[in-house]
Image: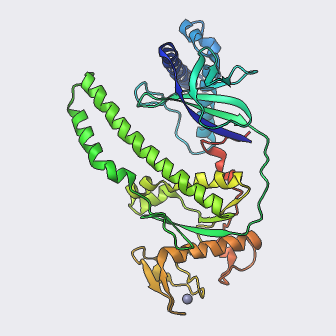
Amino acid sequence: MNRAYKFRLYPNKEQRVLFAKTFGCVRFIYNQMLADKIKCYRETGKTLQTTPAQYKTVFEWLKEVDSLALANAQLHLQSAYNNFFRRNSCFPKFKSKKKSRMSYTTNNQNGSIRIERGKIKLPKVGFVKIVQHRAIIGKIKSVTIEKTPTNKYYASILVEYENQVTEVELQKFIGIDFSMHDLYVTSEGERANYPRFLRRLERKLARLCRKHSKTKQGSKNRERLRHKVCLVYEKITNQRLDYLHKKSYELSEKYDAVCIEDLNMRAMSRQLRFGKSVADNSFGKFREMLSYKLYFRGKKLIIVSKWFASSQLCSVCGYKNSQVKDLSIRSWKCPSCSVEHDRDINAAINICKEGKRITTVGTTGSNAYGEDVRRLQPIRVKRSLDELGSSRFYKRG
Ligand SMILES: [Zn+2]
């Protein structure tokens, strides 16, 4: 099992220079290899395989930086290529000096990376001051050094450890319905009451951006304002992550199984024209956090099929009211048993019931409402970690 930890770094002046050089070399080798691959393909129709070592004779300054960082750049390019051929990803793009993320990845070889007395040892760079705010369990595999647009340095440390998760017997279930206003509503009627972090700072951002656009290119003032804008964005991101971590922690501590609907966030923000709201409350990120937090506690995230009509069914008698399809209906009265329903809470209760059903019965048999299950395919009970294959936190392997 792999797990990642992120710590803040405080490099000295020399180390900052070396970091900057490494970011530059990594970007250079990536772009150079990509350009050569494209050129070779145009001329011969074959895919060129090169290694960073081949470039070191021509570009001697590449020897100054960590060679593993360059090797990883090669791997990153290779996976970008593979993604392009296997999935429907875009063709690899060249990295820009101004816009690309400043980062590089290096690997641990027989203790070449280790943490000692508040410092982390990195190849070529030496001991860098680190604020290790939590203990690391396991063996360090690799480290990614990153510099943020606000000039802060972070190390993401990937460790490998023995999997000791013991599965919990699932007793306490909760259903969660995605909601535009509150982030989510639970089957127990609790609303997450999500603060609109982006909206709150929108005016401040607009003012800063306006000022920034009026400054002269290359001036000190422009750089000062750029820094300010980045600080605001950083604040929004931090507020959001902090909130999502707290909420997902709460749920994963309190319940054994969390049932949610399988939603395609990107399609949703496009179709329903809620764009900014969906992007602002980052339900996808929340789901990812829930998933791994539950996994570490031996608990489960249960994904209910998106074809399950969670909002249309009455959670008391099971009557299907197709009029509720209209998203503007916030509450309704069941024509069959005349119970008053809140749209979101009713949906969450249905999701919870359906989640319970698929963990006990599996995907065969009729569901709690006597509906034909075959029509509701695909229903999946994902092991929570399967979803994390491509996530930033964990990599398979
Ligand atoms: Zn009813």
Q: Residue furthest left?
A: 214
Q: How far across and down, in percent of the image, does residue 373 sit? A: 69, 76
Residue at figure coordinates x 48%, y 67% from the top left: 191
Residue at figure coordinates x 54%, y 93% from the top left: 337
Q: How many numbered marks does the figure carry?
A: 0
The image quadrant of residue 363 is: bottom right
Q: Quadrant of ligand 1?
A: bottom right
Q: How far across and down, in percent of the image, does residue 381 sit? A: 70, 63
- The answer to whether residue 230 shows anywhere in this view is yes
Q: Is residue 276 above or below residue 380?
A: above
- The answer to whether residue 311 shows anywhere in this view is no
Q: Is residue 190 above or below residue 313?
A: above
Residue at figure coordinates x 57%, y 27% from the top left: 130
Q: How far across and down, in percent of the image, does residue 202 sit? A: 30, 49
**Picture quarter with the N terminus:** top right
Q: Nearer the viewer, residue 283 or 308?
A: 283
Q: Is residue 190 above or below residue 198?
A: below
Residue at figure coordinates x 43%, y 61% from the top left: 271
Q: Nearer the viewer, residue 142 or 244?
A: 244
Q: Is residue 17 above or below residue 107?
A: above
**Picture quarter with the C terminus:** top right
Q: How far across and down, in percent of the image, does residue 384 sit? A: 68, 55
Please give left or right for residue 181 compared with residue 212 in the image.
right
Image coloring type: rainbow
Q: Nearer the viewer, residue 282 or 250?
A: 250
